[in-house]
Amino acid sequence: MEHYNMNLNLKVWRQNNKNTKGAFKMYRVENISSEMSFLEMFDVLNEQLIKDGESPVAFDHDCREGICGSCSMYINGKPHGPWQANTTCQLHMRAFKDGDTIVVEPWRADAFPVIKDLMVDRSAFDRIIQAGGYVSVNTGNAVDGNTLPIEKQKADDAFAAAMCIGCGACVAACKNSSAMLFLSAKVSHLALLPQGAPERTTRVQNMVAQMDKEGFGSCTNTGACEATCPKEISITNIARLNSEYIAASFAD
């Protein structure tokens, strides 16, 4: 693949905290390698800002390997940028052209208040998990995995749902800021497995209640969440979530 350098204009959202008014600010970065990751490009920008005596742009990151869900950025109107099934940290600058203007914003959701600049507080997801995203286990020796036979299709579906990294792209993409895809993935991968049976009814009820308490909107049924999910979580999980919730209501 041909390597090249480019000069870019960055329109970046700057905001001190959730209680202050934010605004876009323009920056210029030059000689950016096409093989840099998007976050490496921001590292270059921040080195430039620090050298100029300005405050660096705050953004979230951890593993930079596409599995932690931290690198939440809204890039040119799409969560995680233009590449399909991709996180921001795995987006490379060859996705852009010399002279491009790139607009970068934090997630747009009341339930994800801005901490600073491009960093948002996604602890609402943590509280949803704490409400029911766990299983009961007996202490003592580990049970042999082969003692619980599971149909291959159910195992595959459970693993597919468990791939959710909780980045919040589904919320950012939804016009109602719904967390249904995230919640359905977390409910599905436990509901499909026998280990999830003990809390099956209380789990879905408690997690849905917590989701509503956090202020996420209702599902729009437009599929924007699935289209922007970096792990391609299927919206069939939302149908499973609804089924689990109805069944739990009758169980009461």
Image (cartoon, helix red, strand yellow):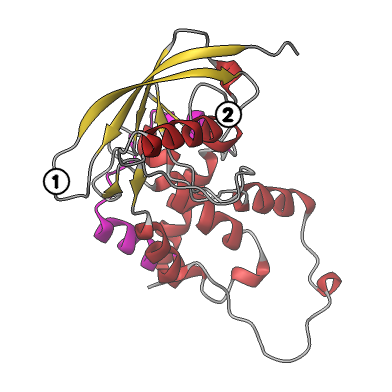
Return the residue at label 2.
Answer: 91
In this view, 77 is above or below 185? above
In this view, 142 is above or below 42? below
Residue 8 disc label: none
The spot of residue 8 in percent (x, y) is: 44, 15
Q: In which quarter of the image is residue 47?
A: top left
Q: Is mark 2 on a helix, strand or loop?
A: loop
Magenta residues span 204-230
The residue shown at (32%, 28%) is 12
Give neighbour class at mark 1: few <14, some 14-19, many 20+ (Cα, 10 Å). Answer: few
Q: Which of 113 and 129 is in front in this view?
A: 113
Answer with left or right where residue 47 lies relative to residue 196. Answer: left
Q: Is mark 1 on a helix, strand or loop?
A: loop
Q: Quadrant of residue 204?
A: bottom left
Point out the image quarter for the C terminus: bottom left
Give neighbour class at mark 2: few <14, some 14-19, many 20+ (Cα, 10 Å). Answer: many
Q: Based on the picture, tell me whether residue 208 belongs to the magenta stretch.
A: yes
Return the residue at label 1.
Answer: 20
